[in-house]
Every structure is written in structure tokens, then in C-alpha cells.
Image: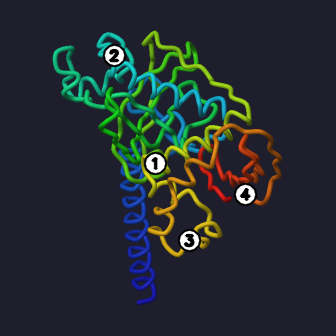
Amino acid sequence: MENKAQKKILIIVGIILIVIAILAYALSLLIKDDSSDNPSVKPGLNEPTDVFRDEIVRLEDEGVFFGVQKVINDYYNSIFEEDTKTLLSILDPLYIEDNQIFANNIYTIIGSDYGITNYVAKEVYYNPDSSVTYYFVSGDLTSNSIMGDEYQFLEDVSFLIIVDESNNNYILRPIDTSDLSSYALNYHLIERDVESGAIFTEVQITEVNKLSNYLAIFINFLIDNPEEAYHLLDDDTKNDYSNYNDFLAQVVDLYQSLSSKVFSYASEEDDDRVIYEVVDDKQNKITIYEYHIMDFQISY
């Protein structure tokens, strides 16, 4: 009886070991078949679906920032001048293919009724230290007809600019998003050869010119878009008015009293912002709080 019991136990143990071996083998096959989803298995950079760098940060380099802004203003200038050849060379070939863009329909796809435009970038995200740099840009577009009688203000107009760091050639495409940072973080970055002939260059401006630009944006908004001017005020200055309508009633006087020319300025860093104490050439004292490039508030 004891021998039979021992044999029975050995048989049961043997069955368990066989089952474990089968499960281990099946699991090894599953892992092998699913290796394409394993983050440690990376396809070659020549694969068109390869994500070669997924780190996305906010751009803080002023020269690059204003270079990005210039690219977009050059794009709108090419539309205004109906420079079809340039537009076809700088538009992303994938965007051209997806939208079936040709010389005879390009303005139907990208638009042509912008008039005289000015694009002001507000925020830019990018992938640092890469052979191909993706700049995700959001900003505001103002446009006037040639006669100056049709003003438009378009908020959160976004673009993707792709720069090949080996030759500084760039291409761009309009993008549609309400959350630029999320869009950039989830964008599928791939290696691309860019040979558009259009060269990306930084645009260096002095602090005086930057502050003058901030003042000009605010002053122009006072007439063209007072609601946006009101949004640029810091909370303490807003509290000087009983409400937006009270501010609106005074914008003409404010417009006439302020100047975008900087007579003098001083600056200091405070937590996550830079505070500029500015005196314009009409001797108005204005405080500008800068949180990022082109992200600022006004106090007076």
C-alpha cells in the first residue's frame, strides 16, 4: 500500500512538472511573438515608423523662438504674394500628399484671403538634441485687407516646423489642436530628410526690441482687439477698472497716452518670471511680467 501511495505521488508530481514546462514554453512563444511591442526592442532608424526621440520641452531660446516665428510669417507672406513655387517647396510633402495639393488648387486648400498678416508665436515645444527637430508652434494671427477695412484676429493658429539639422532646411504644415503640449507629446517623431532649399535661421533681437514688441502688441490690441488687451493686464491692473466695459470706455485715451518706444528699463528675476520696469518715451511707467518668451502681462 505504501509503494502504491508513493507511486501515485510521483505520478502527480510528474504531471505538475509537465504542465509547468508546457506553460513556460507557451509563454516564451508569446513573448517572442510580441517582441515588436517590447520597448526594449527598437527598430532601425531607417524604418519610417521609428520614434527616434520622444522628449518634448518648451522652447526658451529667444533666437530660435523668433526664427520659428519668422518662418511662419514668411509662409503667410508667400501666400499674400501668391508665390506658389515657394509654398510647394516649404510645405511638408506628407501634408501635400495627404491633402492632394497641386499648383492649381493650393490656395483652395491653405487659404488665400488673409491679406496683410502678422503672426505672433505664443508658445513653442520641441525635441532637443536631435538630428531632425520638430517645432510645435501656437500663436495668434492678425490680418488686414490692403485697404485696411477688414481686420481679423485668429487665436491659437498652430503649425509644425521640421528642421533637418544637417543642412538647416525646413518644411512646415498647419496643424489643428487645442492643446499644443499634449499634441507635441503624442506626436510620432520619425527620421526625415528635408531638402526644401529653405534655410532655418535664428533671429536675434535685443531686450529693448523685445520689450518694445510687447508694448506694441498691447497698444495695437487696444484698438484692434481690446478684449485681448484686457486679457494681457495683470490682476491688480484689472481691478483698477470696475469691469471690462469700464476698461473699454478708456481704451482710446490709453492708446493715445502710451508708446511702444522704450526710453529705459530695468529687470529682475522673481520665482518663475522676469519683471521689467519700463519707461516709454512719453515717460509712462509700465511693468511687464514675462513668464516665457511672448507670454507676458502688463501693469501700469
* Label 2 packing within 10 angstroms: few (<14), some (14-19), many (20+): few
Inter-mark Cα distance, 3 to 1:
18 Å
| Kind of element beneath mark 1 | helix
Name the residue beneath numbered marker 1: 223
Residue at image location 68% in from the left, 26% down from the top: 204
* The residue positioned farthest toward the bottom in the image shown: 1
**Residue 191 x, y percent position in the rendering:** 47, 26
Question: Quick one: label 2 or label 3, which is nearer the N terminus?
Answer: 2
**Residue 9 x, y percent position in the rendering:** 43, 80
Name the residue beneath numbered marker 4: 272
Quadrant position of the C terminus in the picture:
bottom right
Name the residue beneath numbered marker 2: 81
User: Label 3 is placed on what type of residue?
Assistant: Tyr
Q: What's the mark number on residue 241?
A: 3
Left or right of 34 on screen, residue 128? right
Check the image and report above or below for 292 versus 102: below
* Label 1 packing within 10 angstroms: few (<14), some (14-19), many (20+): some
Inter-mark Cα distance, 1 to 2:
27 Å
Question: Quick one: label 4 or label 1, which is nearer the N terminus?
Answer: 1
**Residue 155 x, y percent position in the rendering:** 40, 48
